[in-house]
Amino acid sequence: GQQLNQSPQSMFIQEGEDVSMNCTSSSIFNTWLWYKQDPGEGPVLLIALYKAGELTSNGRLTAQFGITRKDSFLNISASIPSDVGIYFCAGRFTGNQFYFGTGTSLTVIP
Amino acid sequence: GAVVSQHPSWVICKSGTSVKIECRSLDFQATTMFWYRQFPKQSLMLMATSNEGSKATYEQGVEKDKFLINHASLTLSTLTVTSAHPEDSSFYICAPLQTKNIQYFGAGTRLSVL
C-alpha cells in the first residue's frame, strides 16, 4: 500500500523548545490528518487539513498542507512535558482509505 | 471531537479461545469502520474496513475467518479474534469514520494470549 515517510523518527528536546516534523508521500492527497498517541492509548486527532496550502493551528500546534499536496508539516511551539508521545500523520486521496506515517516519537526533557 | 468507546481495554486469554472486542461511536453514526492492529513501536496496520450492513473488506494477509468483523449498526462494530494464539497478541484499535472524512480512534484493546 501507499507509504508515508515521516521524519524525524524520534526527537529528544528540551522543554520550551519548538518542534518540527513532516510527512511526505509519493502520491497526492486531498486530506491530511495529524494524531498524537500516548502509550497504551488510541491516537487522538490533533489537526485536520483539507486544502493545499492550508495552515491550521490548535493551541501551540500548527500544521500545514503542502502546496504540492504530497507533504504536510506539524510544528509544536514551546514544548512541555505532556507533549511526549508518538505523532502520526495520515493522508487520504479519495474514498475512505487513509495511509499512516511511520510515526515520530517525541521526548521532552524537563 | 467525536467520542468512541472501545471495550475491553485489556484482555488476557488462553490459547484457543475467542475474544470479542466492541467499538461504539457514542455521538455520531459511522457508516464505515476501520480496524487496526499495532505492534510495539510501530505504526498502525489496517486490518479491515467494514461498512454497516455489509461484509468487511480485509487487507492482504489478514485472515477473514480468524478476525471476524460485524458492523450491524451505525454505532457498533465488533472484532472477534477466533481461536486466538500467542502470535495474535497485539494492540487492536477501531476507528469509525465521521462524516467529515475524519477517523476518530477508540482507546484500543491490548490482547495477550497465553
Image: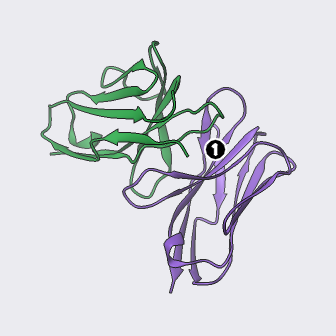
Chain colours: A purple, B green
Identify which amino acid the numbered label 1 is placed on.
Gln
Q: Position of residue B97 (x, y in %)?
A: 55, 32
Can you identify the residue that label 1 sits on? A3
Look at the numbered disc 1 and give the secondary structure of its residue: loop
Q: To which chain does the residue with label 1 belong?
A: A
- The residue located at (53%, 22%) in the rendering is B31
Q: Is residue B82 above or below residue B53?
A: below
In the rendered view of the protein, which quadrant contains the N terminus of chain A?
top right
- Residue farthest top in this picture: B54
- Whether residue A1 is visible to the viewer of this picture, yes or no, is no
Residue A44: % across, % down: 52, 52
Q: Nearer the viewer, residue B26 or A49?
A: B26
Q: Position of residue B80 (x, y in %)?
A: 29, 28
Q: On the picture, is B64 further left or further right than B51? A: left
Is A92 left, or right, of B42 in this rendering? right
Q: Which quadrant holds residue A58?
A: bottom right
Q: Residues within 10 Å of mark 1 (few under 14, many from 20)?
A: some
Residue B82 vs residue A16: left or right?
left
Q: Depth check: give the residue in front, A53 or B58.
A: A53
Using the image, determine if residue B93 lies above or below residue A71.
Answer: above
- For image coordinates 51% across by 75% down, the residue present is A107
Q: Is residue A22 above or below residue A19?
A: above
Q: How many marks?
A: 1
Q: Residue at x 64, y 34 (%)?
A: B101
- Is residue B5 among what the camera can see? yes
Residue extending farthest front: B27
Image coords of residue A93 (percent x, y):
72, 34
